[in-house]
Image: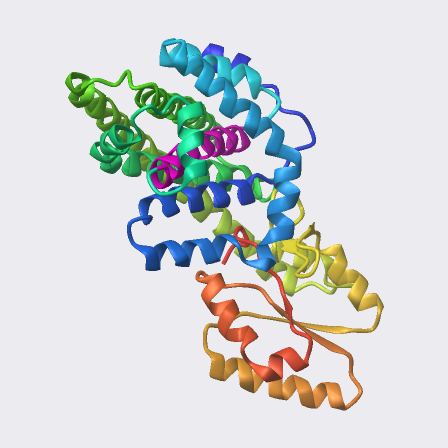
Amino acid sequence: MKKIIQKHAPEDHQVDSAPLLDLTEDIFLNIKMSSESSHAKKWSKRTAEASRMPEILSTVKELGMTVHHMSCEMLQHSAADQRSDAIANAVLELLEKHRWSTKLAIVLAALASNYGKYWLIAQLCLTNPLAFSLAAIKGMSDSTKFTIMLKHRSKALRYLLEKMVSVTKCVMEFEILPLQYVTLDYEAMAMMKTQIHIASYWVIRSSVACASQITSMIASRFEIAKAIPAAWELWSLVQKISYIYAGLSTKFDAFNQQIESKVYLRLLNLFEEVHVDNHDVLYTLFALKDDFPLRDSFSQKKVGVDVLKNKMEDGKIICLYGSNDLGWVRELTKRMKDISEAGIRVELIYVGSKNFEQTTCRVQGCDLVMQLNLILLQERSIPC
């Protein structure tokens, strides 16, 4: 544990790695559903959504080269038959300047890049001349054997990848908790951080194990006799990561509940006070550690509550709302339209729901909302 912490020296500037993790999850899901064309098209469409592209491109611009470098490093170390723990420690050294969630997002993206690339080549090489040539260059001398071997391990790989993504999301959510609003038990906080360190190490080590098995199959060094031990290695890692995730998520939920309760009490007190503007109320309402809880629907950049204050200075009235009931949305926008026609400048801001993408699609389909130039703000971490 001491060695893990010694290899952690994050810089002040940190990149939002959530879009990278989303993209990685899409790759894993596309591999999972590749045999079912209807599902594959569904996930491909989600990845290619125009509204997400600026956010994804911005993240890839800052982390893309690191992911590529990590992808090469993992393959190189795996090909050299080094121990998984030694490779995991080397990875931690390479990623020392990033926070824990970003380390995990980068490693999983590197694994997804390698896994997806070779899976795609193996799927297409029998029908596509380019894929056949690439398979030969990459040493996939028997792509059929590679596909068969991978399918034997597909269930264990799928569960392991899903659990590693879940752990990473939990770490990511913990890092943006608005801890400035509460005083949490020091020992509980220290224990949570220790669990994050352990979880990060095992996600990285499990990713290395996956990369090592894929590398062995590519080089046709994966013998049938070794198939069962290799599968058991993956299943043991699934059990390990599942156990880690259960403990981590339980502690996170407890922290989150404490924070929500204390933020709620703070809001009640703020509502009883007289304010020059609504800055303090909005700052608490959209409480996040990095102070950028909102997202501009046009540029996809994360912004602070000051943008709402600027709108107040422009003489605009802002109505924050959120509902899955389209009938209620139509009624609200009808009333807002009447107010707007009376010469009062008003803007509606949709602040999300638990099923954001589906709800947004329905809300955007409402003509009245579109006529009022509805601003849609998406942020997965806004407390509800």
Quadrant for the N terminus, please.
Answer: top left
Q: Residue furthest front?
A: 129
128 within the magenta span: no
User: Which residue is rendered at x = 39% and y = 36% of the image?
Assistant: 121
User: Which residue is rendered at x = 38% and y = 24% of the image?
Assistant: 211
- In the rendered structure, the answer to whether residue 189 lies left or right of residue 35 reads right
Q: Where does the magenta region start and end? A: 99-125
User: Which residue is rendered at x = 44% and y = 47% of the image?
Assistant: 26
What percent of the width, then of the height, locates residue 160?
Answer: 31, 34
- In the rendered structure, the answer to whether residue 140 lies left or right of residue 333 reads left
When asked about the image quadrant of residue 271, the answer is bottom right
Using the image, determine if residue 230 lies above or below residue 106.
Answer: above
Using the image, determine if residue 286 lies above or below residue 328.
Answer: above
Q: Residue furthest right?
A: 314
21 or 144, which is in the foreground? 144
What percent of the width, then of the height, locates residue 234?
Answer: 26, 26
What percent of the width, then of the height, locates residue 236?
Answer: 23, 25
User: Which residue is rendered at x = 48% and y = 10% of the image?
Assistant: 3
Decide whether the magenta segment is chiefly helix, strand or loop.
helix
What percent of the width, then of the height, locates residue 29?
Answer: 37, 46
192 or 202, which is in the foreground? 202
Residue 293 seen from this side = no
When asked about the image quadrant of residue 118, the answer is top left
